[in-house]
Image (spheres, rainbow, N blue to C red):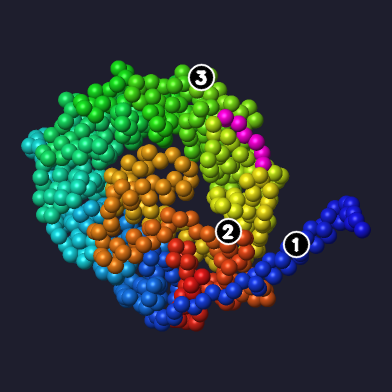
């Protein structure tokens, strides 16, 4: 018997029928999931307000009376800090590029090791009213802090990463290295000195024994053990005694005896032994240097349009857009390969190494152009920059041309296309595009992102515009749609995509779809989310924890990571994982500057994080409709592996760690249970 539902009313009946059937299936799958095993139970002092897993793997638990650190492997409270009780969750965050955590409130900054609980820094010890710089230097096992005091000069201090011991303090870095001037020059010198004390330092760890910093007073090389100034250098700016602007320090990836310093429109190499300039004069671009790429054939200096009040040299403006000029400096003497800077449409916002060339992305009034720079000859492959839709996200040189994927924004779609390097024209006239609302004040770029992942000669792309999966032949420069429309439930769009042996896996917060390589749906599940968005906060933090761990590893592995970053060209998360894996293998370093416990735990977690998890977490209503459950969904089968009942609290105090594969839940006031999933 064939059912027939004409008209809107009958379509509504059909939709309701399907929804009930789908919910019943989800209910059956939920009840089939095994309950997670409670690995341990600990007691803390007071009702738990929030929990936070740290990059190093320790669990922070906050109550009114204390902040406790829980060892998640042993299931015990490792330390507690009553002075940090009652702090809001957003007041305690990872220190950028490190395994440490910092607690902030008005007039106070405390930095501590979350694994051991050791206090590394307390702003009250140096009487600092403002902390301008805090930088972890894993190669020397130290934390550098700089700030201003209510009275006296600004101060720089160095502290041991493991114990928090103060190694040295230096309050003379902000005095001029040049003779004292008179008249107006003296006034400017004094103002510069005051401004320097409150301006964040540029800091570079130049090996285990030396720290190079830039203040507005100039370059200083400090002995990492004593804080003594080993040498000073003044950057060769054209302004009469005026400080350089927009200064950045770069380690040398090939020559260990030097560092590079960019300032304004210039780049200079300095000898690490004595601070002497290695080039007769700086290499220059038109505009302001925002970054450099150390390619084997030369140093590519990437220019950006400077602010109007900081323009250097002649400024060329075409159709309201400042035209910058790019160039390539020779390592030996800093001379540029191109006699004159190569004109670019605007600011060079990105550069990706592709063999002997570098793919350039240029922003001109929110429009993006691309070109290919042959580094050895400092010449562009395209006579005219090719305009693309959106912002460049991924690019590679293929036999067919320049294959790229862009990101959308509120004004324009993203796309996948191939630029013919002979003609400069796109090969796809009807390109793969993302979708976007043409008139919406609530634009969410992530919803219209073109998810992509490479396997062999195929780049798979999912486009939310038509909810289709596409296969791009990276060698032939062609593409085709695979299968039919793939629609997620609950009004969601995919937020991630990865390739697994079972197929292409698309996920969102409440959906998981496994798609065969021919585009056919193999498995699809959906679990409706609870109505309270606060319940999902712990799940949103998962990627932030991984990102912080990767940042700490990148900082610790230093130059090896930087080299790997420039050479890697595979997309998305796989790119980050391969860079870090290469850095870890080539560098051969451990996180040895931290405490032994922190280093051991972080190294273990870092290795584990390089493999994408074979599961995801979804939060949904309990099968009986009362309370909520957290499900662990297997990405290979789309079925629940385990579940934890979060109870009937509107916002239960819980945290999730997908690296350790654990969930932490307050079951009764002051009682914390760790579940191994």
Q: Is residue 264 above or below residue 379?
A: below
Q: Inspect the magenta stretch and tell me whether residue 479 lies in it.
A: yes
The span picked out in magenta is 476-482
On the image, the x and y values in percent for residue 47 come to 44, 79
**Label 1 with label 3: CB-CB less than 8 Å:** no
Where residue 297 sits, quadrant-wise, is top left
Marked residue nearer the N-terminal end (3 or 2): 3
**Which residue in the structure is indicated by mark 1?**
19
Residue at x-position 55% and y-position 49%: 499
Residue at x-position 44% and y-position 81%: 41
User: Which of 591/285 is in front?
Assistant: 591
Q: Quadrant of the N terminus?
A: bottom right
User: Which of 373/600 is in front?
Assistant: 600
Residue at x-position 61% and y-position 71%: 33
Residue at x-position 49% and y-position 74%: 675
**Which residue in the structure is indicated by mark 2?**
635
Which residue lies most toward the left here? 179
> Disc number at residue 412?
none
Q: Is residue 404 above or below residue 32?
A: above
User: Is label 1 in a helix, a strand or a loop?
Assistant: helix
On the image, the x and y values in percent for residue 191 come to 19, 42
Is the residue marked by circle 2 packed among few (<14), some (14-19), or many (20+) residues within 10 Å?
Answer: many
Which residue lies most toward the right here? 1
Overall secondary structure of the magenta section: strand
On the image, the x and y values in percent for residue 71 come to 37, 73
**Which residue in the structure is indicated by mark 3?**
422
Marked residue nearer the N-terminal end (1 or 3): 1
Q: Is residue 327 above or below residue 217?
A: above
């Amino acid at each position: 018997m064939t059912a027939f539902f004409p008209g809107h009313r009958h379509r509504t009946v059909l939709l309701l029928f399907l929804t009930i059937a789908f919910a019943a299936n989800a209910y059956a799958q939920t009840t089939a999931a095994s309950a997670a095993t409670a690995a341990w139970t600990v007691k803390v002092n007071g009702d738990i307000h929030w929990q936070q897993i740290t990059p190093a793997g320790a669990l922070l638990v906050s109550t009114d009376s204390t902040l406790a650190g829980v060892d998640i492997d042993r299931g015990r409270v490792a330390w507690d800090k009553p002075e940090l009780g009652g702090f809001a969750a957003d007041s305690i965050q990872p220190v950028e590029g490190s395994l440490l955590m910092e607690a902030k409130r008005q007039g106070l900054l405390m930095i501590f090791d979350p694994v051991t609980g050791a206090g590394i820094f307390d702003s009250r010890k140096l009487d600092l009213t403002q902390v301008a710089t805090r930088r972890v230097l894993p190669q020397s096992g130290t934390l550098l802090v700089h700030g201003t005091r209510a009275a006296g000069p600004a101060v720089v201090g160095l502290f041991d990463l493991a114990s928090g011991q103060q190694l040295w303090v230096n309050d003379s870095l902000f005095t001029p290295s040049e003779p004292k001037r008179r008249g107006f020059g003296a006034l400017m010198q004094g103002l510069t000195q005051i401004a320097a004390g409150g301006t964040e330092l540029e800091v570079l760890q130049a090996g285990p024994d030396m720290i190079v910093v830039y203040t507005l007073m100039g370059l200083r090389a400090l002995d990492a053990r004593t804080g003594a100034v080993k040498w000073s250098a003044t950057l060769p700016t054209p302004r009469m005694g005026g400080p350089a602007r927009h200064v950045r320090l770069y380690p040398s990836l090939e020559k260990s005896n030097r560092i590079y310093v960019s300032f304004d429109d210039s780049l200079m190499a300095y000898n690490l032994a004595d601070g002497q300039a290695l080039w007769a004069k700086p290499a220059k671009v038109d505009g302001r240097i925002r970054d450099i790429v150390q390619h084997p054939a030369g140093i590519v200096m990437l220019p950006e349009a400077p602010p109007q009040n900081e323009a250097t040299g002649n400024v060329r403006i075409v159709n309201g857009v400042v035209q910058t000029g790019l160039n390539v400096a020779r390592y030996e003497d800093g001379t540029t390969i191109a006699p004159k800077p190569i004109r670019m449409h605007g600011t060079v916002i990105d550069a990706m190494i592709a063999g002997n060339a570098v793919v350039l992305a240029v922003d001109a009034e929110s429009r993006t152009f691309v070109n290919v720079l042959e580094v050895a000859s400092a010449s562009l492959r395209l006579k005219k920059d090719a305009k693309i839709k959106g912002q460049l996200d991924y690019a590679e040189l293929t036999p067919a041309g320049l294959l790229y994927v862009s990101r959308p924004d509120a004004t324009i779609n993203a796309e996948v296309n191939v630029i013919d390097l002979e003609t400069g024209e796109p090969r796809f006239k009807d390109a793969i595009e993302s979708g976007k609302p043409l008139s919406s004040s609530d634009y969410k770029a992530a919803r219209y992102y073109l998810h992509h992942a490479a396997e062999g000669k195929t780049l798979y792309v999912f486009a939310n515009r038509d909810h289709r999966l596409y296969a791009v032949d990276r060698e032939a420069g062609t593409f085709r749609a695979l299968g039919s429309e793939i629609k997620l439930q609950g009004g969601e769009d995919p937020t991630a995509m990865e390739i697994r042996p079972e197929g292409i896996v698309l996920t969102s917060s409440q959906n998981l779809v496994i798609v065969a390589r021919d585009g056919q749906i193999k498995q699809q599940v959906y679990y409706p989310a609870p109505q309270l968005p606060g319940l999902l906060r712990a799940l949103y933090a998962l990627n932030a924890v991984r990102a912080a761990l990767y940042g700490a590893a990148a900082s610790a592995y230093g130059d090896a990571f930087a080299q790997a970053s420039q050479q890697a060209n595979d997309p998305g998360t796989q790119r980050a994982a391969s860079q870090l894996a290469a850095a870890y293998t080539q560098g051969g370093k451990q996180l040895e500057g931290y405490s032994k416990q922190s280093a051991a735990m972080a190294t273990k977690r870092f290795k584990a994080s390089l493999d994408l998890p074979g599961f995801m977490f979804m939060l949904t209503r309990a099968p009986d409709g009362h309370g909520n459950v957290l499900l662990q969904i297997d990405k290979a089968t789309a079925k629940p592996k385990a579940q934890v009942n979060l109870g009937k609290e509107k916002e239960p105090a819980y945290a999730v760690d997908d690296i350790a594969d654990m969930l932490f839940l307050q079951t009764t006031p002051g009682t914390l249970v760790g579940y191994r999933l």
